[in-house]
Image (cartoon, coloured by chain):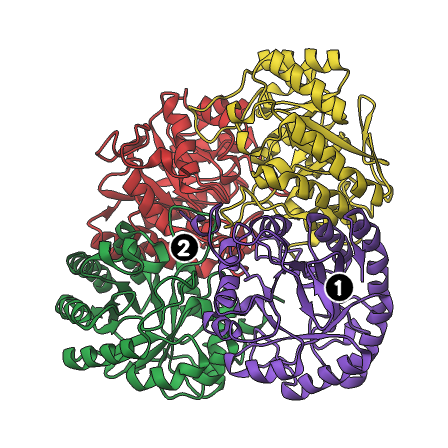
Chain colours: A purple, B green, C red, D yellow
Amino acid sequence: MKNLLVREGSDLLVSRTRQEENTRVNIKGCVVGGEETVVIAGPCAIENEDLLKETAFKVRASGASMLRGGAYKPRTSPYSFQGHGEEGLKILARVGQEMNMPVVTEVMDSEDIELVAEYSDALQVGARNMYNYSMLKKLGRLNKPVVLKRGLSATIEEWLLAAEYVLAGGNGQVIMCERGIRTAEPWTRNTIDLSGVALVKELSHLPVMVDPSHGTGVRSLVTPMARAALAAGADGLMVEVHPHPEKAVSDGPQSLTPRGFSQLMREIEPIARACGRRIK
Amino acid sequence: MKNLLVREGSDLLVSRTRQEENTRVNIKGCVVGGEETVVIAGPCAIENEDLLKETAFKVRASGASMLRGGAYKPRTSPYSFQGHGEEGLKILARVGQEMNMPVVTEVMDSEDIELVAEYSDALQVGARNMYNYSMLKKLGRLNKPVVLKRGLSATIEEWLLAAEYVLAGGNGQVIMCERGIRTAEPWTRNTIDLSGVALVKELSHLPVMVDPSHGTGVRSLVTPMARAALAAGADGLMVEVHPHPEKAVSDGPQSLTPRGFSQLMREIEPIARACGRRIK
Amino acid sequence: MKNLLVREGSDLLVSRTRQEENTRVNIKGCVVGGEETVVIAGPCAIENEDLLKETAFKVRASGASMLRGGAYKPRTSPYSFQGHGEEGLKILARVGQEMNMPVVTEVMDSEDIELVAEYSDALQVGARNMYNYSMLKKLGRLNKPVVLKRGLSATIEEWLLAAEYVLAGGNGQVIMCERGIRTAEPWTRNTIDLSGVALVKELSHLPVMVDPSHGTGVRSLVTPMARAALAAGADGLMVEVHPHPEKAVSDGPQSLTPRGFSQLMREIEPIARACGRRIK
Amino acid sequence: MKNLLVREGSDLLVSRTRQEENTRVNIKGCVVGGEETVVIAGPCAIENEDLLKETAFKVRASGASMLRGGAYKPRTSPYSFQGHGEEGLKILARVGQEMNMPVVTEVMDSEDIELVAEYSDALQVGARNMYNYSMLKKLGRLNKPVVLKRGLSATIEEWLLAAEYVLAGGNGQVIMCERGIRTAEPWTRNTIDLSGVALVKELSHLPVMVDPSHGTGVRSLVTPMARAALAAGADGLMVEVHPHPEKAVSDGPQSLTPRGFSQLMREIEPIARACGRRIK
């Protein structure tokens, strides 16, 4: 009964029985779900324009297709840095334009959807908001791609049904993003569930990305898990990169330096090729 | 490092080192956190006025202090019943007034806070929205009690820090509500963590309730876990009651009948007394 | 399908549909599963005879019925203290006899069953060996009570079926012991699942104890959880007590002092009474 | 503190700070941990000689290096098929010899170690016995390779320390095998933790294999996860193959047919090559 909704014969909009061919989500010319492996890179939080520009320049040079960066940050403590808000969005939009890279950033409140959509080419729903059904409904009425991260302990079915909320509203441009589930393992921040990636690719036509940075929380594991993600069938990666991780306002320990990111790009290339993909 | 923020010496607003005596949250004369064990009862969803009135009448007769019922329902599937919205709020307010019972209901969207606050004596933040920091900040500026459920896989520290978001905004009327965490045990819907209840009572001055209905998902386990919750130190209970659970639009399997609820009230009474409490 | 074996109509030996009345396990005159709440107390490991005697004397004075202590210790590291082995067993047997208390200790290897049975009145299977089916089969051929701890992440069904291994061999004297399951919560060592206790009491006729010491790993939570366990329906408790917890070779942080244990006994008494039980 | 033992500077025998180069475990000429990707294949349980021979013949033709099959089966229920015991071991040994394939099988009891070692080229410790320290100590005195599966909810540190028990006894021929950890996800039997694989390769010199059959419990996910495992750095795979999965006495739903296995071998080949490995 638990898995009823997404089984064979399901008539959910997200289901492969409803649509056999892969959905391709086009973010300003950057297509997720097609022949190319798409890599989104950038800092956890947008700190200032120079830093973002430096990062963008370097990750683009290494082969990243899109730029990420948070203007609204969901932080466990109310006293931690909460992001620069609209000012951050403006910086992101300017840098994206200058570097000619599509940008993606997180929306944390249904009241902010329109504002975020004004500056960003795709809206990210973070793991903490995957169950924010009210916000998902509103994103369903938007004409912009949505990157939907899996909840901290969400089942595959709940995740697919969260996507269904968006599709049911009329917005079919959804990219699923696995970012690790919470387990009792203390070494890693989360446990990346790559069988979940393979399963979503089987059950659904939606494209799937993996975020090995949040998924592991450990710098040295980002590249091996990026390789594994592609081999499991992922259509792309989302990677945190910061020029000076030791000074990052958040998520330093899992951020790659631009040099580390360049190394990652070199190391995923043979795997992408073995999967019949090329890296944009 | 993980537990840094709520250790001894913490200057968080939620911390007992900051305020030694228990906070008492007064919901229209019904005090949570004092000598009385407060029981909130009612159906999962508000289905119609007659049903709610019948339920309210019966649970009040058995000793419930407050009435609950959902007008906005966070459902896994977009095609499940989503609640009657504002119409449901009006029904709840009318029945509460008629029965002279304070009412509590869930708010799912920061845009609905004012509307819900107009009709309800306390606002519940559901488990799925515990990390909705944007909504928590807005609830911090409200002058109404907040019942904050623990997230599906939230740690105690994350839960206390979610409460801190509300307190930091200026609203100190927060009631913590344990409703089970997600584990691999398939017999129960969730696993109630009563050590978490005892721990929050130790670390914080905020009152704590337990929801044994969602916490177990199994009717026969509701009363034993209600007893256990009180013995662990809980200040109150939130229990789902439906006159005809087999016809309930949601959560039937875990709902007590009014007769079952009356039995629960009789069975918790000696435990409450052994804890030096009386049941209002 | 997952829960098939222990549902209604089950003909498992552990099932209440097979035997309606509660099983009472008699450990040298100390009956678990009857009107009395049985408390087993003692140090994690048997360190030396004087210390054990001192502990036994004090916990007996406070009302403990049985003495516990480990001669074989399952330690995560091969370089940690592994227990005194047979020498420890001899100390335990001597102190038990002198104090006139039945003793229980852990068996870690099917090859040691006979040796342990020679010195001990009941044999404990630790959480790490709950799936050691080979050892369970051999315990089924023994004529001594078995205390079967729940595995670190065992489901209720797996736990009951582990007991079935013992009963199927002909040994019906099994006491189930909940000691917490592993979750992502870092404050507590494990998460005690009291709904599991209530569920086993419902599904099975076997007596159930709770170990709030291992279950929480935090001294201040032992008494609240002991109270909660009894209110949930537990037939007894297993509690770690050490005269000098700060010097204990293992599990110091969760051990009560004899004075703390005496306090626990006073605090569980009204709950036991509210449950219609007396404490031996 | 939790991760103390395996951090940098650790002097554990399993640690890479103690031995920089990879350990290569030689199982009768088949080397795990070297340039080749080793694939062990065979049925969950040894049912009869003809079936095993048919399976061995076919998996060898597709490129499997070693044969697996269970003679002692750890089953949740005492009434499920428990394996053919010594008779099964003899069948395995004969078929291995005839096919010229090294064989590996599980040992479930410290009393059976010598018997199993007589017939098998490597001994597998199953997930349920990873904490069976008593058995691990005895395996440390054996001169045969040990395949050590990760426990159902074991942390990486516990798993490495379980290996340390074997190494400390003098037996350095240990192969780690990830087989999925238990989570709340109901679609898959377990959740394969490939970051754990990458982490063990980083922290330790021991070779690591992955069992995508038990790890997922779902036939269609075995090949994607086999590919992902190699990309994450695994030295080999252990795969369940049965000529007629629908008639298998255990684990049918996750077993590949010989044809499915042949397909798997074709699909992992480009990934192995991209990792600079060849498949024996």
Left or right, residue B3 beside residue D24: left
Specify whether disc 1 shares its chain with disc 2.
no
Q: Quadrant of residue A63?
A: bottom right
Q: Nearer the viewer, mark 1 or mark 2?
A: 1
Q: Is residue A208 above or below residue C89?
A: below
Left or right of B148, for residue A221: right
Above or below residue A165? Residue D52 is above
Nearest to the observer: residue B19 or residue D145: D145
Few, some or many C-alpha atoms within 10 Å of disc 1 (few <14, some 14-19, many ≥20)?
Answer: many
Q: Could one spot residue D138 in this view of the protein?
A: no
Q: Are marks 1 and 2 in contact (CB under 8 Å)?
A: no
Residue C256 in the image: state x and y as whole percent.
Answer: 45, 54
The type of residue carrying mark 1 is Val
Measure how far apart labels 1 and 2 are at the Cα level. 37 Å
Q: Residue at x 16, y 70 (%)?
A: B50
In this rendering, position of residue D67 left or right of residue B180: right
Name which residue type carries label 2: Asn
Residue corresponding to mark 2:
B190
Specify the subunit that label 1 lies on: A
Label 2 CA crowd tier, 10 Å (few <14, some 14–19, many 20+): many
Q: Which quadrant of the structure image shows residue B46?
A: bottom left
Secondary structure state at the residue bearing disc 1? strand
Q: What residue is shown at x 81% (from left), y 36% (from top)?
A: D33
Q: Which residue is mark 1?
A: A39
